[in-house]
Image: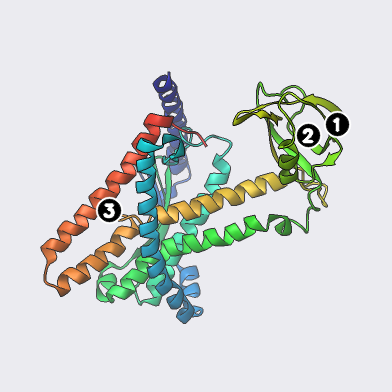
């Protein structure tokens, strides 16, 4: 049954992908995109530009500050490399000794591992990842005196990407430390961006305060099919109290429900009036009361056209942006070919091996680390598929 479901989703996704690429090929011909810097190949489209004014402008502003930041990025890069490697290794071990504690590790594939509902948030998050990552590489390169040939965007099948193309001869001429700054700048900017977005998440009520008042209830964002609330509550309902006790936010709701027994009749005050409600049993504790709904704090809008779901969508956007900037920034630090982490590790290994005249040993060590890192990552993906199927998010 699992493999049947997976194959159906793969076929459906393949059809959608083919349709998208037919539109891309037609648009390429109709609008003569070749003359506008667009290159098209089998399931790959690349847009290149030599207009790099924004990178040049940013690099010229406070170059000393950029250099300090990107120097810190070297340290953070190697710490992040060790951190993501250890996390993946621990997760791999969990698949064998504690499967319930293992986290899914899957590539983001629209229609396969990404649901249509999540796709807009993921596209925005990926745009933030790609722009901050590649612009930072470009700024670091210019600060170190490396010329840039071009920059651009690409789509490979269903995988979006971005790039900054430096002059390779210039890269070879700068010092190893300069190269480390350039290679580490992308992931460093992703991690810093993730921390800034985390700051927005942890102060969410303050962020939306100009447009929304303080939380005064709990918004039902989804009703679990077949759950206790199915047919009684619906998406968009607001719960103001339970048994007369105010539920001004999700935390208050959880605290009140922790005192309610399974199959107990309670009184809900909602935006639709008073509802007599019989709880179900919580999946993780059969003695505790369960509503069978997904919830979010309800922030009353100060502006009429901003609906009740706007804060939910904005929070979800911040969540995805945080997860993608942090995880992609860290994954890019893995010592695997074509990733920035491999370039950083290669610089260090080459420097050490040349200093001690042991280039052959250096290559063996470097290739061994690459192979092990790739194996750990692939095993995480394979075991996720075998244990959980294609988890749609």
Residue 309 vs 351, above or below: the answer is above
Contact, CB < 8 Å: mark 1 with mark 3?
Answer: no
Name which residue lies at 71% across and 48% down.
311
Q: Secondary structure at mark 1?
A: loop
Horizontal side of 364 relative to 331 (left or right) equals left
Q: Between tags 2 and 3, which lies in front? A: 2
Question: What separation in Å lies between label 2 and label 3 (alpha carbons)?
Answer: 51 Å
Name which residue lies at 48% across and 33% down.
111
> In the rendering, which numbered label is found on residue 237?
2
Name which residue lies at 36% across and 39% down.
381
Q: Position of residue 252 (x, y in %)?
A: 75, 44
Q: Nearer the viewer, residue 249 or 328?
A: 249
Residue 282 vs 168, above or below: the answer is above
> In the rendering, which numbered label is found on residue 337?
3
Q: Between tags 1 and 3, which lies in front? A: 1
Q: Secondary structure at mark 2?
A: loop
Label 3 Cα neighbours within 10 Å, binned few <14 / some 14-19 / many ≥20 = some
- Place residue 172 in its image quadrant: bottom left
Name which residue lies at 76% across and 57% down.
209
Contact, CB < 8 Å: mark 2 with mark 1?
Answer: yes
- Place residue 185 in its image quadrant: bottom left
Q: Secondary structure at mark 3?
A: loop
> In the rendering, which numbered label is found on residue 172?
none
Q: Position of residue 278 (x, y in %)?
A: 77, 24
Q: Nearer the viewer, residue 62 or 232?
A: 232
Residue at image mark 1: 272
Label 2 Cα neighbours within 10 Å, binned few <14 / some 14-19 / many ≥20 = some
Horizontal side of 1 relative to 115 (left or right) equals left
Residue 53 vs 215, above or below: the answer is below
Question: What separation in Å lies between label 2 and label 1 (alpha carbons)?
Answer: 7 Å
Q: Position of residue 375 (x, y in %)?
A: 27, 44
């Amino acid at each position: 049954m699992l493999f049947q479901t997976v194959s159906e989703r793969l076929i459906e996704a393949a059809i959608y992908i083919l349709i998208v690429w037919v539109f891309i090929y037609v648009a390429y011909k109709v609008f003569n995109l070749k003359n506008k810097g667009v290159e098209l190949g089998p399931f790959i489209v690349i847009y290149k530009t030599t207009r790099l004014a924004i990178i040049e402008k940013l690099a010229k502003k406070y170059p000393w500050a950029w250099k300090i930041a990107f120097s810190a990025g070297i340290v953070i890069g190697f710490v992040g490399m060790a951190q993501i490697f250890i996390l993946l290794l621990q997760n791999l071990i969990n698949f064998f000794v504690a499967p319930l504690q293992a986290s899914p590790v899957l590539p983001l594939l629209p229609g396969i591992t990404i649901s249509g509902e999540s796709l807009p948030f993921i596209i925005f998050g990926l745009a933030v990842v790609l722009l901050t990552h590649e612009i930072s590489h470009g700024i670091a390169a210019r600060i170190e005196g490396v010329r840039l040939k071009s920059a651009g965007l690409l789509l490979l099948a269903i995988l979006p990407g971005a790039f900054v193309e430096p002059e390779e001869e210039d890269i070879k001429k700068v010092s190893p430390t300069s190269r480390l700054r350039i290679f580490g700048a992308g992931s460093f900017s992703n991690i810093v961006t993730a921390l800034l977005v985390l700051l927005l998440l942890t102060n969410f009520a303050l962020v939306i305060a100009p447009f929304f008042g303080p939380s005064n209830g709990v918004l039902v964002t989804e009703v679990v099919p077949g759950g206790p609330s199915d047919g009684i509550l619906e998406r968009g309902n607001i719960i103001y109290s339970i048994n007369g006790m105010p539920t001004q936010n999700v935390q208050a709701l959880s605290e009140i429900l922790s005192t309610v027994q399974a199959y107990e009749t309670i009184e809900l005050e909602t935006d639709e009036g008073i509802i007599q409600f019989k709880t179900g049993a919580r999946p993780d504790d059969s003695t505790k009361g369960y509503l069978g709904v997904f919830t979010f704090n309800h922030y009353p809008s100060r502006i009429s056209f901003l609906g009740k779901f706007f804060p939910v969508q904005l929070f979800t956007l911040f969540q995805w942006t945080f997860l993608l900037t942090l995880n992609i920034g860290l994954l890019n630090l893995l010592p695997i070919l074509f990733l920035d982490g491999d370039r950083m590790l290669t610089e260090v290994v080459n420097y050490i091996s040349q200093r001690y005249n042991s280039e052959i040993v250096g290559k063996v060590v470097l290739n061994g680390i690459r192979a092990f890192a790739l194996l750990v990552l692939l095993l995480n993906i394979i075991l996720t598929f075998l244990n959980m199927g294609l988890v749609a998010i």
